[in-house]
Structure formats: C-alpha cells, structure tokens
Amino acid sequence: MRLYVYVMEAHDLVVKDSCFVELQVGKHKSKTRILRNTNNPAWNEEFLFRVYDMNEELLVSVFHQDDDSNGLFNGAELVVRVRIPVGSVAAENNSTLPPAWYSFERPKSGKFINTDCGKILLTLSLHEKGHDAAANDLPCLHSNITEEPKEIDSPFVSSNGVLCSKSPCGKIPGGKQLMKALRRRMDRLLHKNDEASRTDDSSGLSSSVSDYEDCMEEQHSNCSFEKSLEMMQSSESEQKMPENLPGGILIDQAYVVSPSDLNASLFTPNSQFRRDLAELQGTTDVHEGPWTWKSGEMSCLTRVVTYINAATKLVKAVKATEEQTYLTANGREFAVLASVCTPEVPYGSSFKVELLYKILPGPELPSGEESSRLVVSWEVNFLHSTLMKGMIEGGVRQGLKDSFEQFSILMAQKFKVLDSTDLFDKDHILAMQAGHQSDWELAKEYFWNMTVVSTIFMVLYIMVHILLCEPSKLQGLEFHGLDLPDSIGEFITCGILVLQLERIYNMVQHFVQARLQQGSDHGVKSQGDGWVLTVALLEGTNLASLDSSGFSDPYVVFTSNGKTRTSSVRLQTTDPQWNDMWVSLEGKLAQSSQSKLHLRIFLDNNKGHETIKEYMTKMEKEVGKKLDLRSPHRNSTFQKLFGLPPEEFLVSDFTCALKRKMPVQGRLFLSARIVGFYANLFGHKTKFFFLWEDIEDIQQHPPSLSSVGSPLLVIVLKKDRGIDARHGAKCQDEEGRLRFYFQSFLSFSSASRMIVGLWRTRALSPDQKAQIAEDLDDHEERSKMLEDTESILNLEDTKMSKVYTAEIPVNTKSLMEMFNGGKLEHKIMEKSGCLHYATTAWEPIKPNIFERRLSYRFNRNVSIFGGEVACRQRKSPNANGEGWIIDEVMALYGVPFGNHFRVQLRYRIEKSALAHNACKCNVYVRVTWLKSTMFLERIKHNITGKFAHRLQDIFEMVEREILLTPQQDIGL
C-alpha cells in the first residue's frame, strides 16, 4: 500500500522562525523544506510512504531549526506534533481523507497535552501501487475549510522508501492544476452537486497524477543528469564546499577545461572517461545506477556504482560498491563524496574508504580559456575498532596511490594540464611592457607639480612687474649694474625665487639623465647550459629614498652569467611600476623600509630533455655513481612540496634526521638548484630549502655521543643567506652563519659524496673542489674502516694472544664502571693519552647483547703519529652469568698502514675464585689483516707490545681510582 500525504500549510504555530515538518510512518521519515519568519507557513509539498501494517500511525511533527547549529538535526528542536492512524484513512470513502485541519499537541514532561498550539492542513490518501490515486484523492472536502490552500509549486524528491514532491521527472499535478481541481471540488461540494459530476470532473486531474510513483521508480528515465544538476543549483539550501578529507591529497591539479565540463566528464552516466579508466585499471562488470534524489538535512543527488576491481599482488579481484553523492553543485563548484565498500577483502566489513572529489574554478588564463582545479582527498572510515587499523590504512594508501597515478595519466591525456607557462604568458607580459611613454608624456607627468607651477607663476609675475616699473635711482651701496633689494620683503622674495629655480634646475637635470640612461623593461634574458632565463620587471614598493623629498628616481640593474642590463628610471616615486615574484631587497635601509621588487621570471629549456640528461651525466662523474632520472609523478610531488617551477627536477633524496634540540626524522631532497628538507611528525611539519650557492662549507663529523653514534653532515651557509630556512638551523655561529646538522643516513658515505659532489659543481673553485675531494676520500676511508668491523666482532678467540691477566681487588660491578661511559671511564682514558674521548650509550641489539661506539685521538706520548681511533664494543654476559665479555674492534687512521689491519680486543671480567670482593680480568689481542704488507710481523709485534703495557697501566689506574674514590663518585 502507498500512503499519499499532502502537506499544505499551518496556522498559529508557536514558533515563528525557521521551522519545518517531519513526517514518519514506521521507520521511514521525510521532511519539508525550512521556512523562516512566519507562524503561518505554507509548504505545499507531497510525500509518499510505503505502508505494510494498517495499525501504523502517521506522525506529523513540527521542528524549530536553530540556524547557529551545524550537523544533521543537531539544531532541530521538537515544538508540536500530531498522530493520525493510517487505518482511519482506509476507513474513509475511497480510502481518502480530504483536506482537513489537524490540531497540534504540545510536548510536556515527556507526555503530550492538548493545548491551542496551532493546526496543519493535510490531505491523505491510501492506495495500492498502480491505482489511479489522484482520481479518488478529492471526492469531497472537509466542512470546516475556510481558506483556500496556496499553489503547490515544488518539484518532487525521492528518499529512502519515501518519494516527495521535488523531482523534475514528469509533470505531477502538484501546482496550479491541483489547486484548480481543489477549487472545483470545493464549489461542487458547496453547491451539492451529485457524485457522478464530481467523478467526471476529476478525471482530468487523475490522468496526470495516477502514475507519478511509477515515474519515480523508473529510475528517473525522463529526468536528465543535466536537469538534475540544475535542480540542485536552484535549491534554496546553502551549499558549502567541504574541507579536504584528513587521509591526504591524492590529486591536486589544474586543467584547461571548465568546471562544468570536467564534472560532466567524470560523473555523467556512462561517460567515456569512466569507461577508459575502467579499461586502464582492469576494472570489470561496471554497473552504474541512475542519479536519484535523496532527501534529508539537505536534498542531494546520489547514485550507486558496482564493479570488480582488478587483482593485485596482495589482493584477489573483489567486488566493490561505491555510493556517490553530490554535496555541492552550484554551477561553478562541485563536490562529490564517494563511499566505497569492499566486504570481500580481509577485514572489509570493518571499514569504508571515502573519496572526496572537489572541482573548483581555476586561475584566469591570458588566452581567455576557462580552467578548473581538481582536488581528490581520502580517508578510511572505520565502522568498528580493529587491531589491524594501521595495516588497513597502509594498504588503502598504497592501493589508492597506484589507482590515482593511472587516473592522473588518463586525465593528462584527456585534458591539458595547466602549468606556469599557461598562467603567465611570457609574450603577453613582455608585450605589455614593450610600449614606452613618449618623452613629452613623461615630461608632462614629471613636471606637472606645485613646485614647477608656483615657480613659473612667480617668474612671470616678476617679469610683468619689471616691465611695468620705471628704473629706480641708485641708493645705498648700489652702483650701475648692481641692483640690491631695498627692503626685507624684497630680500625674502629673491631668496624664495632662487631656491625655486634651483629646484627646477635639479629636476631638469634628473630628467635628462634619466632619459639618457634609457634601459629595457620588457625582459632581461640570460642563457646557459640549455636554459634561457627571462626576467620581466613589473613594479616595486616602499623603495628607500635618499632624497630629502622622500622620493627617489629608482632603476634596477640585473646581472646574470656576466651580462648586465638596466631598466628605465622611474622618476620621483617609491612605488615604481615597470609594467610574479616579490623579492625583498637586502641592506639595512631597504629592510627598514620593507622595500620589495615585483618580478616575473620565465625559465625556458631550449634543449628539451637533453639538458637534464647532460646535467645528470655531469653529476655522475662528480659523485661516482649512476644517477637515474626520477619519474614525472615524483618530480611533480617534489615541485608541489616546495613550490618550485615545473623545470626544477629532482636529482636524489635521502632519509635522514635533522638535528636541532631534538632530532626530527624526515627526508632530504637534492635538485639541480636547491637543497630541501621535509618532515611530518604527527601533523607538525618542518619544511625549508636553500640554494646551493648559499652554502659556504660542508663538514663531516665522526660519530659521537651527541650524535648517538651516527656521523654528522654539517652544512654551513654564507652570512645572511638562507634567512627563510633559519627555523631548520641548529645554531648561528659567531660570524652570523646558519649551521644545519643532518644525521642518521642509511648510507652516510653515499649521501655525503652525493651532496658534496652537487655542491662542488655549483659553488666552488677548482682548488676548493680538489681539497673537498681529498677530505671526502679520507672520511670515506674512515667510515669503511668502522663498517668493516662487523665480521671481525664475530670471530672466535682461539688464535688470540693473552696480553694481560690479573686478580683485581674490586668487585665485578665496580670494574664494569670502566665500560659504562661515566666519569671514571673518561678520567682514566684521558689520563692514558686519549684526546676528545666520546662514547655512545649501550644499545641492545639482541637479548642480553649490547653495543656502543667510541672515538678518540691518541696524543703524541702514546703514538708519535698521533692518529684517530674509531671503535665498536659489544658486551654480553659470560656462560655462568657471573661476569662479562667485552669485544672491541679498533680501526686506526692517520698512522702508517692503518688501512691494512684492525685490532681486536677481548676483555673477560668474572668473579674471582680467590677472594669474595675481587674479580679476575683477562685481555686478549689479535691483529686482523685486510691487506698484505712486508712489515706484517713487525707491525703485529709492535701492536701486541704496546697494548700489553697500555692495558696494564690502564687497569692499575682503574684499581687506584676505585679504591681511593667513594662509590657514589664513580658512576655517571
């Protein structure tokens, strides 16, 4: 059964502003539009409900809408309501209740009481599907109708199990035709016409209403997609563009196509773009449902699309259901929310993937074409909690990334991608600047001011005065040829005239010099390595003045690749326009005035990809490794991240940590022009970049305690350079240079060689390059020394030589303080001749196995060569658990043949069997050879002897320090 409800109007409501009616039958609900500023609202809307139980009730409720609240019904407050049994409609003649007024009841303390709180005019009709409902809707009218209902002019809308009068599908007698029929019925009732005439006269009405539900259920076959969008655009409800979803941005790209055309290509039923995308992605069994109207807080357009995703390496081919809903469609902006369900994937019933497509107007183009911007964002909406949340989000992220890479490729094939060359038409900009003002126009503009006008007036006035006056006789100190002022007034007048004439003379001189120094404002070009740089000078602002008048005569000088160009002079202004880049000027005076220049820069590549290939080949020679050109998607991501032009290409990038007060893990990007760093830690982003030319020095520091055992790469900028990146610097030295510290590279030697190699090609002289190369080779040798110790640490001690054994009268715990990095260790090692001694903390690498690193330098008393030492120590308990075994591998550099061998030490410290408060210490030494040499035996003998004496001295000092120092002073 179908219940037809006509909501016409209400009178004397207790609420005056922002109210609407909600109708409910069983679980199905629908509501009228919101009307404001009236207590006699007229809705004139029609609704349809499916009825399965005749004992159900129609609940009619009036709500007050709070406009300050957001969200679905969050601001709706129940005011009054009335209940109408559905069975009462079935009991009436022809199962129709004619238009009648129903009094509302007011809620109070959880119950409803009958009070005078308004009434509502309704018409109800109950019929089976296919029945000519309208023919029987209006057989008679209630006797107490006193006012003629208003016209129903709303179209029809469908909702979940509900159809309401807001659809453009077919012509339903919901407007003037219906009201005319009502009037005819009223007249016939009042004049007591017979039933037959009423039935005959209503046939015209019934013919237009009878099949309206069939029209709605036939998937809006007579309603085009374009008309539905027009209907949504004409909706009275305010449409706001939603924010991007928090999962991230998949696409953010501008295209040379109008927003409406782009929207039609993406979402028109059975669009060619969707078919091509399905073929590209391997999607099969695509079924697109019709776009239908859905009523709710805001009426919207929605459809359901089902398809089978192509199988991947991890997931088989699965069926997906995608519900697409228009959130915004105002003709210029469109927003479509797609909710995708894939119940067949693992944990698929616990989440939905939501995609938000936003189509916005793009920037204006010089060609006059329309452009649009497409932004696609995503998030995972979990229906209930699951322990696999992280894994699900990671899988969804990777799947969407792969899918929308193909989406971007197809979009680029279908529509022209908008880039900077489209936004800034170089020829157009330069053509604007090519025309210069004539000298007469410039002179008129420059000299037309109060100073010149007043001076000309005074000169003319005095000349007329001279012509009218007779020659005066000589008096005072005058003589023939010298006429002096005869009063103070004449003296002041002469002084003013002289100052005015001097001012005019200076202005004329400036004007002539400016015209003689005529430059070019329509672009400065410089070429090199396949690139053509064009700079268009537009305007300046707040330029500092050296003139007492507060104005200046500025012009700009450009220098690039040894070429110098000057612009024309702009006279007497601090905000010149040379007809887009604002560049802050350096210098104390300029900075105090906040002086800026507005430039527009065009970078053209006249060799195409050959320029990039040549550059990469050149870099390969510098860094000593093969460099691969990055993908267009990765290059585009890099350019958008740092706001770089499309010509900037990524050379390499590394995972590393930026060291400030606390290390920040991120990624270091290297391009042909900049060094950039980006990190995103729980939403807190760190991003900066600086030019290669800004770098003054690159330093490499060995592992230390402060760097947590990782080598440091320190980039030092020139003074007053990289100001925009100062938030990423660890410190600023006494010379005013910013210092950036990077550590925790996966391969420090590879990263450092790459960074130094790129820097050398951009900013160093040949002598500087040679020195850097020598230092880099030395550091790589030391790094390799330390990295090669892994295999040595795992050697057995069967062939090791015992060089020290002793019973020490201290317990094992006290002696192990020598290896804990505390004050005792540092004090002993400094006394034993170790300079700049640094250790890292013990870090667990396996259960009960710990590792740390050491670095120091021998003084000349220990070794005549000095030399630096890099060590790795590994600590583990002995077999009975009453002692420790410490393995140490030592790499020496700066000593003869230091790169030919490694020194392995093994300390065995265990509880002594002779005394309760003593321990036994055995030390073994072994020399492992990496390269052969004729001095092998001699070197081995010297090392063994040296370490035997050195270890004896060290443990004797340890014994004295422990026995003579209170226990609380031994530790850290």
Image (cartoon, rainbow, N blue to C red):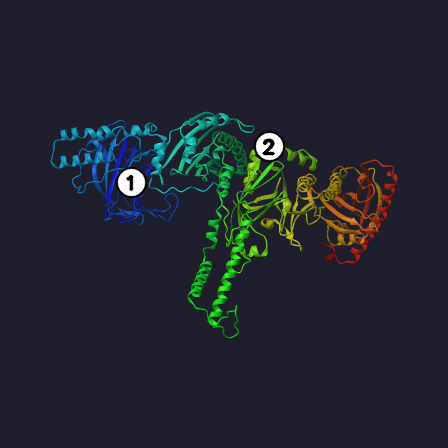
Q: Residue at x 48, y 50 (%)?
A: 442
Residue placed under numbered mark 2 in the picture:
609
Can you see residue 251?
no
What's the amino acid at mark 1?
Leu
Q: What is the x, y in percent for residue 176?
A: 22, 36
Of 442 and 273, nearer the camera is 442
Which kind of residue does numbered mark 2 sit on?
A: His
Q: Mark on residue 725?
A: none
Alpha carbon distance from label 1 to label 2: 71 Å
Side of 952 where 558 appears, left or right? left
Which mark is in front, 1 or 2?
2
Q: Determine whether 957 is above or below 871 in the image.
A: below
Looking at the picture, tell me which residue is in the foreground, 314 or 258. Answer: 258
Return the residue at label 1: 59
Residues at discs 1 and 2 in contact (Cβ within 8 Å): no
Tell me where residue 215 sits by quadrant.
top left
Element class at badge 1: strand
Side of 803 relative to 347 (left or right): right
- Specify whether 284 is left or right of 901: left
Quadrant, the N terminus: top left
Nearest the viewer among 417 and 526 is: 526
Q: Is residue 23 at least partly visible in the picture? A: yes
Q: Quadrant of the C terminus?
A: bottom right
> In the image, is residue 703 above or below residue 338?
below
Place of residue 712 in the rendered image (x, y in percent of width and height, measured from the top left): 68, 46
Where's residue 313, x and y in %? 56, 28
Total of numbered circles in the picture?
2
Q: Tag 2, which secondary structure?
A: helix
